[in-house]
Amino acid sequence: MTKQTKSAKEVMDLIQEMDNAERWKLLNELYYKHYSSPEEKYTEIAMDY
């Protein structure tokens, strides 16, 4: 896999094409990577809602 630079619009277009479950997984990953405190343990989201 090669790295490609994407614009914000291109990323938004890709997200728009995802199914809802994949969007939730992405939000969960982004939260733990960028917004959670270092002490907070990673929790996989339950997809049985």
Image (cartoon, rainbow, N blue to C red):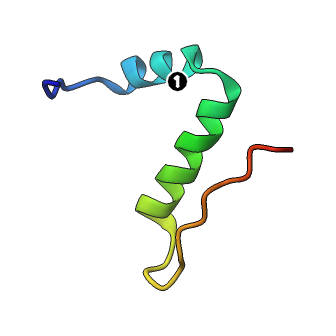
Q: Is residue 6 left or right of residue 22?
A: left
Which residue position holds label 1? Answer: 15
Residue 36 vertical placement versus 26 (above, below): below
Q: Nearer the viewer, residue 49 or 13?
A: 49
Residue 21 x %, y %: 67, 32
Residue at the extreme right of the image, as rendered: 49
Could you say which is closer to the camera, residue 31 or residue 19?
19
Q: Position of residue 20 (x, y in %)?
A: 69, 27
Q: Residue at x 67, y 54 (%)?
A: 45
Q: In the image, residue 6 lies at what x, y percent?
A: 27, 23
The amino acid marked with disc number 1 is: Ile
Q: Quadrant of the C terminus?
A: top right
- 25 and 34: which one is in front? 25
Give SS at disc 1: helix
21 to 11, vertically: above or below:
below
> Percent position (x, y) of residue 3?
15, 28
Q: Residue at x 37, y 27 (%)?
A: 8
